[in-house]
Amino acid sequence: MAMQRSYNIHDAKTNLSRLLKEMAGGQQVIIMRDGKPVAELAPYREPRRKKRRLGFDTLPFELAEGWERPMTDAEVDAFLAGKL
């Protein structure tokens, strides 16, 4: 288990580079205000992206007749009004 170190806000601002090295070395770094923890330094992690598989929808569907034609102005107005 990693060791935990706590620093007040002033010390954290003054020694940010050192705290980042400690955190990168596996040490848990907690920032305190008035003796109470308010933040924890943590290493940056790249967000994990789900792989998208196109064309593998499991639900059957049908396209309406004339789906490829442009909408009329009246249809656009009805769509924007939430009536379609």
Image (cartoon, rainbow, N blue to C red):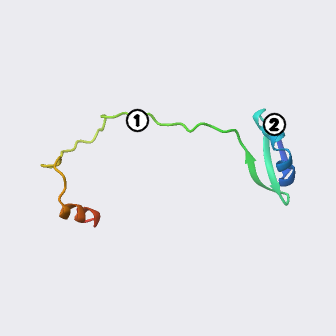
Q: Residue at x 87, y 50 (%)?
A: 11
Q: Tell me the residue that label 1 is attached to.
A: 52
Name the residue nearer the viewer: 39 or 69: 69
**Residue 22 badge:** 2
Q: CA distance from mark 2 to mark 1?
A: 38 Å
Q: In this picture, is 18 found above or below 31?
A: above
Left or right: where 30 falls relative to 46: right
Name the residue nearer the viewer: 76 or 21: 76
Question: Which of the 4 image quarters holds residue 18?
Answer: top right
Q: Residues within 10 Å of mark 1 (few under 14, many from 20)?
A: few
Amino acid beneath label 1: Arg
Left or right: where 28 falls relative to 82: right
Q: Residue at x 85, y 60 (%)?
A: 34
Q: Residue at x 19, y 56 (%)?
A: 71
Label 2 vs 1, first from the N-terminus: 2
**Residue contact at pointers 2 and 1, CB within 8 angstroms:** no
Can you give x and y, in whole percent of width and height, for residue 44 in the image? 66, 39
**Residue 24 badge:** none
Q: Quadrant of the C terminus?
A: bottom left
Q: Residue at x 31, y 34 (%)?
A: 56
Element type at marker 2? helix
Amino acid beneath label 2: Glu
Element type at marker 1? loop
Can you give x and y, in whole percent of width and height, for residue 21 in the image? 80, 35
Question: Which of the 4 image quarters holds residue 29?
Answer: top right
